[in-house]
């Protein structure tokens, strides 16, 4: 009987372990972009519906919103060309209408592209001999760098196609040949991109300095294939600035090389990855869009009702912050904040009761593995101030969407064009992408500022945010 009882105990332990493993596998299979950090592209055609709290938070129907200005093709007052059309014969009696009086005119405007072709300008520099016998030669403009070369307009278009529209080299050369008649070789195109990035040293330093002194800066990182190996693209951004860097490492080494966090004293918005906490001069704020996705996944597990309550709390708190911001208030009513924080603590206590510490197995060393719901609960408890920063400081947004939107474009470039073959090529792309993205945010035409770049006068961003002194 003792042997039979021992077997039963052992089988029960095996069954419990298998049940836990099946539950974990089902949890992983049930992950999608709405309840995890998986990208939306991984959802495929069976994309799930948005969670209820996200639907409530948005509340907008597709299409034009009430009160929003419409957009249509409007006629201009001064067209480039006017073509007159006159009837030749009367539709009634077929009489000639050449001398008939004009009693009305109807006008229609056609917006179209002119014929696009390369315009070749030949620069001739004279040499003149002075009476003293010295021969002096005139100088060439900066764009005339060789006996035959592409000018700033073509070079700007090359960089725009590759870093603004993410075209692969082959497709960019094909477009240039078909549209403007420029047979740019692939190697020449890569050299132009490298040249443009090399001219942006002053721009990069100015953006970095403004990010260091910004009141709120967003940080994010994402993997990228460079030279056949995993590298990391780091995004540092505000509503008016973008800076992208690429590095073989993901952690503090890459963040230090980016040059913003080591001296940053504002509010750093991020996703809670551990290396961000190693910069004590910054005030930290966590991305609550990540928390909503994780709470949705946790709420699907049995016994985790606290997760749905916390998701509802985040939705209510976001509405309170948005209402105060729209009203022009300096902050949310302190009494409302106190009640919300008290409710936050109650939900955390309920989550603690639902997730007691797991028992330590005999002979087990090190940390005991916890389920994802327990890890999420612990993070929300330990970093309550960073989670609720948006509620207590209206300068801080609810989520890190600013950084995620910016870095999503870099991921889109990889999806369209593939990985980068060399690290210098990836660095050149990130530098030019920083230039184009920052220009867009500040209302600049990317093609115009890229042309300025190759004319030797790169655009520099205006200081859009109130500077704060750097820490000693």
Image: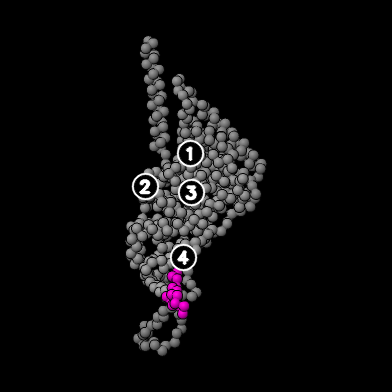
Label 2 crowding class (10 Å Cα cut-off): few <14, some 14-19, many 20+?
some
Q: Quadrant of residue 182?
A: bottom left
Between 331 and 424, the one lying in front of the other is: 424
**Residue at which label 4 appears:** 455
Give SS at disc 4.
Answer: loop
| Left or right: 96 as drawn, with respect to 457 | left
Q: CA distance from mark 4 to mark 1?
A: 49 Å
Is residue 293 at least partly visible in the picture?
no
Q: Is residue 200 above or below residue 115?
A: above
Residue 227 is marked as 2
Q: Are marks 2 and 1 in contact (CB under 8 Å)?
A: no
**Do residues under tags 3 and 1 come within 8 Å of each other at their CB atoms?**
no
Please state which of the two labelled residues, at mark 3 or mark 4, is closer to the viewer. 4
Q: For the residue labelled by badge 2, is the local secondary structure a helix, a strand or a loop?
A: loop
The disc at residue 294 is 1
Marks 3 and 2, how far apart at CA: 20 Å
Tell me the residue that label 3 is attached to.
235
Residue sitting at x 41%, y 66% = 145
Q: CA distance from mark 2 to mark 1?
A: 34 Å
- Determine contact: label 3, label 4, CB under 8 Å: no
Q: Are marks 3 and 2 in contact (CB under 8 Å)?
A: no
Return the disc, 3 or 1, that comes first in the chain's sequence. Answer: 3
Classify 10 Å Cα crowding around label 3: few (below 14), some (14-19), many (20 and above).
Answer: many
Residue shown at the point (33%, 61%) measured from the top left? 185
Answer with left or right where residue 127 lies relative to residue 354.
left
Q: Main secondary structure of the magenta part?
A: loop
Whether residue 95 appears in magenta in the rendering, the answer is no
Between the C-alphas of marks 3 and 1, the distance is 23 Å
């Amino acid at each position: 009987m003792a042997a039979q009882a021992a077997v039963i105990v052992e089988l029960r332990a095996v069954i419990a372990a298998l049940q836990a493993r099946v539950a974990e596998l089902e949890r992983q299979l049930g992950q999608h972009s709405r309840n995890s950090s998986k990208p939306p592209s991984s959802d495929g055609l069976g994309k799930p519906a948005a969670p209820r709290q996200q639907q409530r938070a948005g509340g907008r129907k597709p299409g034009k919103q009430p009160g929003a200005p419409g957009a249509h093709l409007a006629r201009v007052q001064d067209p480039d060309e006017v073509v007159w059309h006159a009837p030749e014969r009367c539709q009634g009696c077929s009489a000639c209408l050449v001398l008939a009086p004009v009693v009305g005119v109807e006008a229609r405007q056609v917006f179209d592209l002119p014929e696009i072709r390369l315009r070749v300008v030949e620069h001739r520099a004279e040499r003149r001999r002075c009476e003293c016998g010295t021969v002096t030669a005139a100088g060439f403009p900066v764009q005339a760098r060789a006996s035959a070369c592409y000018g700033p307009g073509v070079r700007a278009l090359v960089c725009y196609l590759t870093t603004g529209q993410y075209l692969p080299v082959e497709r960019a050369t094909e477009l240039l040949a078909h549209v403007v008649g420029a047979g740019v070789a692939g190697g020449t195109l890569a050299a132009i991109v490298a040249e443009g990035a090399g001219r942006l040293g002053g721009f990069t330093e100015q953006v970095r300095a403004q990010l260091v002194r910004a009141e709120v800066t967003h940080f994010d990182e994402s993997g990228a294939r460079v030279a056949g190996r995993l590298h990391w693209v780091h995004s540092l951004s505000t509503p008016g600035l973008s800076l992208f860097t690429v590095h073989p490492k993901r952690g503090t080494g890459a963040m230090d090389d980016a040059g913003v966090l080591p001296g940053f004293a504002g509010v750093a918005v991020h996703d809670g990855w551990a290396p961000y906490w190693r910069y004590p001069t910054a005030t930290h704020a966590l991305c609550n869009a990540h928390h909503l996705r994780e709470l949705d996944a946790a709420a699907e597990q049995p016994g985790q009702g606290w997760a749905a309550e916390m998701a509802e709390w985040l939705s209510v708190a976001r509405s309170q912050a948005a209402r105060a911001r729209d009203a022009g208030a300096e902050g949310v009513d302190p009494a409302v904040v106190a009640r919300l924080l008290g409710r936050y603590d109650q939900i955390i206590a309920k989550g603690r009761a639902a997730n007691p510490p797991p028992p330590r197995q005999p002979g087990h060393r090190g940390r005991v593995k916890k389920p994802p719901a327990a890890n999420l609960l612990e993070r929300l408890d330990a970093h309550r101030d960073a989670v609720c920063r948006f509620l207590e400081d209206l300068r801080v947004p609810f989520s890190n969407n600013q950084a995620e939107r910016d870095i999503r474009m870099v991921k889109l470039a990889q999806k369209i064009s593939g990985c980068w073959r060399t690290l210098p090529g990836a660095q050149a792309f990130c530098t030019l992408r920083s230039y184009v993205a920052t220009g867009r945010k500040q209302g600049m035409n990317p093609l115009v500022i890229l042309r300025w770049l190759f004319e030797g006068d790169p655009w520099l961003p205006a200081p859009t945010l109130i500077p704060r002194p750097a820490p000693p």
